[in-house]
Amino acid sequence: MILSFVGVVFIILLQMERDVVLSTLKNTIPGQVTWTMNLFFRILTYIVLPILALLGAQFSDTLGQAVAWIAQFKAGHQ
């Protein structure tokens, strides 16, 4: 269910990016996908985070180990 939501959201985001009216408002080329930071953050918010939440729910032990490893890595470089 979550993966189908993610797929639909990705298609909608790309269609919005290609839309003539929205492209005119954003001063980008209509009919083309312009990879801006705004699009990147929308993809991160609506696609990457739900996938990470799904993986975290399915593999909580592995996620906990990965978070601990990242925390140790970050603490060592401060």
Image: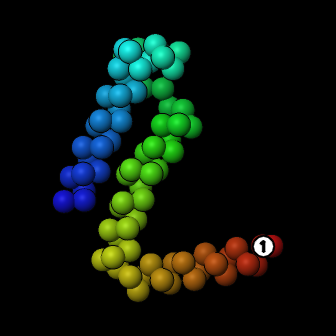
The quadrant of the rendering that contains the C terminus is bottom right
Left or right position of 43 against 75: left
Task: Name the residue type under label 1.
Answer: His
User: Taking 36 as reference, is 18 above or below it?
Assistant: above
The quadrant of the rendering that contains the N terminus is bottom left
Left or right position of 19 against 70: left
User: Taking 12 as reference, is 21 above or below it?
Assistant: above
> Which residue is drawn at the image coordinates 59% and 80% (left, top)?
69
| The quadrant where residue 58 appears | bottom left
> Which residue is denoted by mark 1 in the rendering?
77
> Which residue is drawn at the image coordinates 50% and 41% (left, top)?
40
> Which residue is drawn at the image coordinates 36% and 60% (left, top)?
50
Q: Residues within 10 Å of mark 1 (few under 14, many from 20)?
A: few
Left or right position of 21 against 44: left
Secondary structure beneath dot 1 equals loop
**Residue 55 position in % (x across, y down):** 35, 70
> Which residue is drawn at the image coordinates 64% and 78% (left, top)?
71
In this orientation, does residue 36 appear?
yes
User: Taking 30 as reference, is 69 above or below it?
Assistant: below
